[in-house]
Each structure stands twice: as structure tokens, then as C-alpha cells.
Image: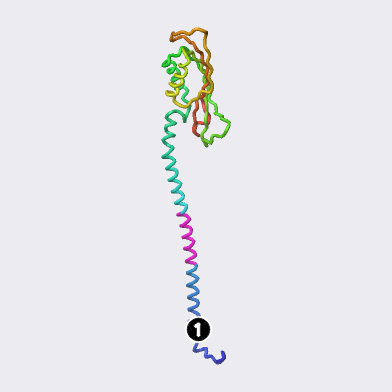
Amino acid sequence: MKISEIDWSVLRGALILLLVSVLVVAGALSGSFRFWAKHDLILKRANSTLSSTRGQFRALDDEEDIIATYLPRYAALEEQGVIGREQRLDWIDVLRQTARTVRLPKLEYTLEAQRPFDVGWDLGVGDYAVYASSMRLTLGLLHEGDLLSFFADLRKNTAGLFGVTACEMKRNGQTLSNQPLDSNVSAICELKFITIHGPETKAGVKS
């Protein structure tokens, strides 16, 4: 059958219905695609947010673990006077009391101003800074063992952290005295008292 012989009047309704069906299906497909694309984007954003939130929760858990581990140690160092402002007056009081306890015949000291403690490399302490106050001690000892007893008691009772950087002893005369107030040995020692300052204290440090 030739195209010219087709009775289009008979097929017109079917063709119109077919065209309308095609348009409806195309519109439905287009709408479905847009709906899928929109909700796929929403889903991706939701998954990204969920992943970010999970990461934040993991970070919070890690921070809580770090805090639980290190906060008691930090608090202990604060209580001991290692972190915070230097305990200069307490150091001197303990120094004098220790000398009386050990019954040293002589105690003289000079305490210098606090300065940044430079060890020659980066300590990696972040916003914190390490400071040191140098002290020079001149001691009179009845015997050499008094020096060990003095530093043992001083380390036990002193608030903070200190180290002995140098010490020199010499005997006073040839004869030894058994009198408690006599100095048979003289000692000159260098100490450093260490404190760690946080951001709130390291600016404008005062002795």
C-alpha cells in the first residue's frame, strides 16, 4: 500500500493519541530524571554531611581521650608549680627551711631574674614557653654528705622543677671540726628553677 492510499482520517485519532502518549512519556521521563538528579544531589550532600559529622565525632572522641589522659598530669604539674608563674618566694622559704633541717653552718644565695630557657633546639611546646631562673648557692658544710642531704630534701619539698647545673667543693683548712656550726667544707653550686608558662602568663613575665 502506498502512502497516498492511506486514509489518514481513520488514523488521525490514533496518531494524535500516540503523539500525546509520546509527549506524556517524554515529560514523565524528563521529570523523573530531574527528580532523580535533584534527590541524588541531596543524597550526596547528606552523605557528605554525615561523613563530616562522623569525622567530627571521631575527632571529639580522640580529644576526649587526650583530655582524659593528659589533664590529670597537667593539673598535677600546675599543683607542683611546674606550670604557671614561678614560685620565687616559696623557693626561698623552702631553701632556708632545708638549710635549717640539714643544719648547714652557712647559706648564701642570689636568685637572678627569670629568662627564657634556651636548650639549643625546639622543644615543640606550642603556645607554651619554658623559663628558667638561675640561682647561685654558697654553702658551708660540716661534711660532704650534708650537700647530698640538702639537695635531696630540697628536691622533695620544693614546688616546681629545678636542676643543679654545676657544683664545686673545697675543704676549709687541714683540721676537721665536729662542731655543728663549723664549716669544714665550702660548696658553690649553680641551680636553675624551671617553670612552663602558657599563653596567659608567658607575655610580660615578671620575677
- Taking the magenta stretch, the answer to whether it contains residue 3 is no
Q: Secondary structure at mark 1?
A: helix
Disc 1 marks which amino acid? Answer: Leu
Q: Residue at x 50, y 76 (%)?
A: 23
Which quadrant of the view contains residue 166?
Answer: top right
Task: Tell me where residue 167 appears, x and y as whole percent.
Answer: 53, 19
User: 24 above or below 122?
Assistant: below
User: 173 above or below 80?
Assistant: above
What range of the chain is rendered magenta? 34-50
Farthest residue, direction right: 120
- State the residue in front, 145 or 18: 145
Task: Tell me where residue 175 appears, x and y as whole percent.
Answer: 50, 7
- State the residue in front, 72 or 204: 72
Identify residue for label 1. Answer: 15
Q: Residue at x 50, y 27 (%)?
A: 194
User: 7 above or below 126?
Assistant: below
Task: Tell me where residue 178 appears, x and y as whole percent.
Answer: 44, 8
Q: How is the image coloured?
A: rainbow
**What's the magenta bit mostly, secondary-structure-wise?**
helix
- State the residue in front, 145 or 68: 145
User: From where the camera sits, is residue 47 visible?
Assistant: yes
User: 24 above or below 13?
Assistant: above
On the rendered image, what quadrant is the N terminus found in? bottom right
Task: Tell me where residue 116 appears, x and y as whole percent.
Answer: 55, 28
